[in-house]
Amino acid sequence: MKAKVFKLIMMFLLLSGVCLSTSSCSKDDDDDVMSQFSSLFSRTDYFIDMLDTVYEYYDVFGSKSKDSSDGKYIVTPIGRLIIVKKKASAGSVTYEEIKVAITNHYKNNSKIKDVYQNNGGTVTIDCRK
């Protein structure tokens, strides 16, 4: 009898552990990141989508530079690089957080070769072939 109760308790604990591990909060966290950077992604998506369809590459002077719709970031395409710079209104967001968010956003995009943080702090999206 005790062995049977022990087995039932162990099965319950195992099943509970599986349920808890598969229902993590990561999806909610991803949604928070997406909403925090949605205006940035909207701008970077636009510049990346224009590569190879309208432009082979952008000019070297950054004349097509645009602010994100929330005014927190400046996105500057130069050649086949997209430079992201945060403005003072971005608050406490770090460049490392921006880099991680961009890396996750474009992880399955074949146009993106690399995402890295420059020494000056800006984040670069590398779209070179």
Image: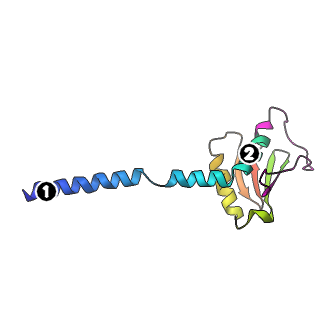
Q: Splitting the image into 4 quarters, where does residue 120 fall?
A: bottom right
Image point (70%, 67%), residue name: 92
Query: Residue 45: x and y, percent?
Result: 74, 43
Q: How are the residues colored?
A: rainbow
User: Callout 1, which amino acid?
Assistant: Val
User: Is the residue under label 1 in contact with that under label 2 (CB below 8 Å)?
Assistant: no
Residue at which label 2 appears: 42
Q: Quadrant of the N terminus?
A: bottom left
> Outermost residue toward the left?
1
Q: Which residue is mark 1?
A: 5
Q: In the image, 66: left or right of 127?
A: right
Label 2 secondary element? helix
Toward the bottom, the furthest residue is 92
In the picture, the disc for residue 102 is none
Q: Secondary structure at mark 1?
A: helix
Near mark 2 (Cα within 10 A), the count class, few <14, some 14-19 or many ≥20, is few
10 Å crowding of disc 1: few (<14), some (14-19), many (20+): few
| Residue in view at x 23 percent, y 52 percent | 11
State yes or no: residue 54 in magenta: yes
Q: Earlier in the sequence, mark 2 or mark 1?
A: 1
Amino acid bearing label 2: Ser
Magenta span: 49-75
Mark 2–mark 1 Cα distance, whole angstroms, equals: 56 Å
Is 84 included in the stretch rendered in magenta?
no
Residue ID at (20%, 57%): 9
Q: Quadrant of the C terminus?
A: top right
Residue 4 place in picture, x, y as percent: 11, 54
Residue 121 in percent (x, y) is at 77, 64
Can you see residue 51? no
Q: Is residue 41 left or right of residue 53?
A: left
